[in-house]
Image: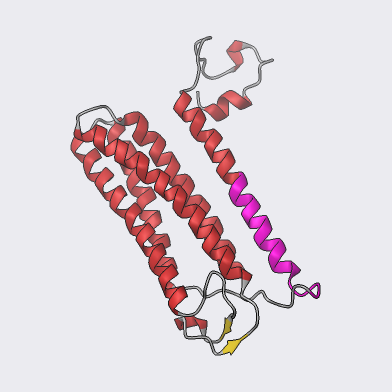
Amino acid sequence: MSIFDRLTEKSWETPGATAYLEPADYRPEAARVALWVYFCVATMLFTLLTAAYLMRMLSHGESYEVVHDWHSIPRPTLLWVNTGVLVLASIVWEAARFAAQHQQTAKIREYLIAGGVLGFLFLAGQLVVWRQLHDAGFFLAGPSLCLGDWSDLSQPVVHFPSSNPAIGFFYLITTFHGLHIGGGLVAWARAIGRATNGIDVHGIVSLSATYWHFLLVVWLAMFGLLLST
């Protein structure tokens, strides 16, 4: 029985009314419970970031202290490439889980290597995006912001006395997501180490696959937020 089924089961129903039964002393794995607790905490964190992002965006220009300082951020093409890389990583991790379930040792190692490479590639791509933005004049904090043709990340042509808070939020959101990617790579290192030593990796691969699916969902939500505002 999954954790969701355990939480939503109806205790007042008779045992015969359920399609499946677990032993009376059944308890879900501690690691799986910890992972879902982590998901709840991470979801709250990104929800708060989203709320702060939207509130800050809607509040610009409403007072003398905040003078129309919010402007749409550039959308480098590489962000789409990085999104595709993360989608592939999620698919590869699901393939690794399937291979682990069927004890396909050789394929497990292949998928784990591919998953790790894609994870590092995503992080490297995000750093390149940061570099592109910085070189184009979109600094985390600075004395000016720019307006111009952002489709090719051109140099600023119009200057204002304050920095664009949307850029700061972009760096903040991608930093937090990148840290979570780093956590996934730590689990990946453990998994590939166990697989190399011939230790059963079904549990850690299954949890890691779920984790990478979560990272993909979070990134799609954050990327959609950045694109729509």
Total numbered circles: 0
Indicate the quadrant containing the C terminus: top left, top right, bottom left or bottom right. Answer: bottom right
Q: Is residue 164 above or below residue 176?
A: below
Q: Which residues are magenta?
A: 44-64
Which residue is pictured at 57% across the width and 83% down the height? 146
Tell me the residue at 26%/38% (across/down). 192
Above or below residue 27? Residue 63 is: below
User: Does the stretch in magenta take in 45?
Assistant: yes
Tell me which residue sits at (48%, 45%) in the image.
214
Quarter of the rendering containing residue 187: top left
Residue 131, compared with residue 89, is above or below; it is: below
**Among all residues in the image, which is located at the extreme bottom?**
157
Instruction: Give how far across and how far down residue 129 sits, in percent.
Output: 42, 69
The residue under the point 53% across, 34% down is 36
- Viewer-proximal residue among 124 and 229: 124
On the picture, is 183 further left or further right than 72? left
Asked where in the image residue 97 lies, by quadrant, the reply is top left
Q: Residue furthest front?
A: 143
Position of residue 151 measured from the top left corner of the image (x, y, whole percent) = 48, 81
Q: How is the image coloured?
A: secondary structure
Instruction: Verify whether residue 170 appears in magenta.
Output: no
Q: In which quarter of the view is residue 3 placed?
A: top right
- Percent from the top left, x then y, of residue 41? 58, 40
Return the x and y of residue 7 as percentages of the image width and height: 61, 26
| Magenta stretch secondary structure, dominant | helix
- Looking at this view, name the residue that lies furthest to the right: 63
